[in-house]
């Protein structure tokens, strides 16, 4: 007798298989040590990093002393870029720095909402695909855009569920469903998750994975939240694969109607 | 030699290559990347890439981010 079941399949991006559907960021942690522990607990196998200037006059301790690039697949981002030119150059610098071939294309179009500049995202993604990167763009939850990103060769699409760091949860599940129907590359919800139920809800829709940073790093206890997110992603995925019951307005009895005692 | 490195003006003793500049700045990590006048310099070319007065240089590495 089976006493536990597992997910039917694993997340695969650009031919690489991941045992976890959770991708986590490395920003905003109190220390490298806490960051490392949260990553470990989350079970994530892909982690994002940013690319920034080395501070010339400070000690040059690297985050990669704490996050082993042999153990985790790095997903460098182009966060903070507002133009195609900056984005392409940041990606090329990341690759040259030995951070691998994956790139999270993030071209910001508006400082206040951190919403992506979708036109520039498409353009930068096209250039980087041609340059041999496995491109995973952060983008709006727009089905037409996601289809275009797939068509130009992106390895995944990463629509936002709500603004970065907002914790507002899954604001438009219907748009995510449309995207899931339209594209065949992995759809990874990037940004907006606030707590475990948001993560489960996204996974129950059938998305391939979730990328989050603030929801874990900004929690009062990041280590507990890392564990909560791990479980939420797993249970959401299992519920999706299990297939939920249809919703209906009236009750259906769980106990048999026949054999009731007759008083 | 006057260079602009990561937005700061720097007067370096060495007047040679990217390799010499990194040595003088005491940047030894393997996970770094260098751009010279907005062009990425391949690691394999550090020894042969000469620097000139006023060059704009970016030296980057990975930091925490989401």
Image (tube, coloured by chain):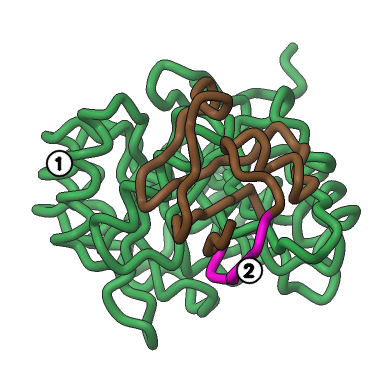
Q: Main secondary structure of the magenta part?
A: strand
Q: What is the chain letter for disc 2?
A: A
Q: Residue furthest top?
A: A1
For the residues marked 2 and 1, what is the alpha-carbon distance in whole angstroms?
29 Å
- Under circle 2, the secondary element is helix
Query: From the viewer's perspective, is the residue at label 2 or at label 1 nearer?
Result: 2
Compared with residue A100, is residue A117 higher up or lower down, i.e. above or below?
A: below
* Residue shown at 53% from the left, 40% from the top: A75
Residue A29: x %, y % from top left: 77, 65
| Stretch of the chain drawn in magenta | B5-12
In the rendered picture, chain A carries what hue? green
- Under circle 1, the secondary element is helix
**Residue A196 lies in quadrant:** bottom right
**Residue A102 lies in quadrant:** top left
* Residue shown at 43% from the left, 47% from the top: B36
Residue at label 1? Answer: A182
**Chain for colour brown:** B
Compared with residue A252, is residue A130 higher up or lower down, i.e. above or below?
A: above
- Nearer the observer, A142 or B30: B30
Is A113 displayed left or right of B50 in the figure? left
Badge number at residue A112? none
Residue A8 visible to an observer of this rendering: no
Q: What is the chain letter for disc 1?
A: A
């Amino acid at each position: 007798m089976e006493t536990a079941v597992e997910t039917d399949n694993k997340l695969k991006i650009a031919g690489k298989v991941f045992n976890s559907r959770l991708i986590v960021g490395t920003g905003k942690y109190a220390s490298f040590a806490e960051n490392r522990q949260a990553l470990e607990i989350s079970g994530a196998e892909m982690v994002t990093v940013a690319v920034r200037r080395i501070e010339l006059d400070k000690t040059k301790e690297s985050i990669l002393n704490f996050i082993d690039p042999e153990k985790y697949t790095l997903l460098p981002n182009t966060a903070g870029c507002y133009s195609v030119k900056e984005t392409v150059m940041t990606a090329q610098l990341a690759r040259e720095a030995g951070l691998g071939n994956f790139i999270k294309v993030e071209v910001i179009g508006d400082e206040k909402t951190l919403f992506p500049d979708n036109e520039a995202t498409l353009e930068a993604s096209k250039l980087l695909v041609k340059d041999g990167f496995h491109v995973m763009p952060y983008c709006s939850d727009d089905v037409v855009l996601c289809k275009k990103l797939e068509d130009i060769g992106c390895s995944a699409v990463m629509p936002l569920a709500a603004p970065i760091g907002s914790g507002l949860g899954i604001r438009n599940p219907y748009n995510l469903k449309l995207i899931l129907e339209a594209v065949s590359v992995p759809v990874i919800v990037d940004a907006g998750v606030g707590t475990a139920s948001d993560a489960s809800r996204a996974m129950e829709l059938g998305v391939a994975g979730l990328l989050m940073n603030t929801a874990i790093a900004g929690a009062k206890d990041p280590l507990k939240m890392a564990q909560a997110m791990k479980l939420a992603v797993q249970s959401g995925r299992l519920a999706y694969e299990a297939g939920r019951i249809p919703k209906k307005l009236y009750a259906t009895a769980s106990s048999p109607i026949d054999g009731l005692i007759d008083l | 030699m006057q260079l602009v490195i990561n937005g700061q003006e720097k007067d370096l003793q060495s007047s040679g290559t990217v390799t010499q500049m990194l040595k003088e700045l005491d940047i030894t990590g393997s996970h770094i990347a260098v751009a010279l006048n907005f062009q990425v310099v391949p690691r394999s070319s550090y020894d042969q890439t000469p620097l000139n007065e006023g060059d704009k240089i970016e030296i980057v590495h990975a930091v925490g981010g989401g």
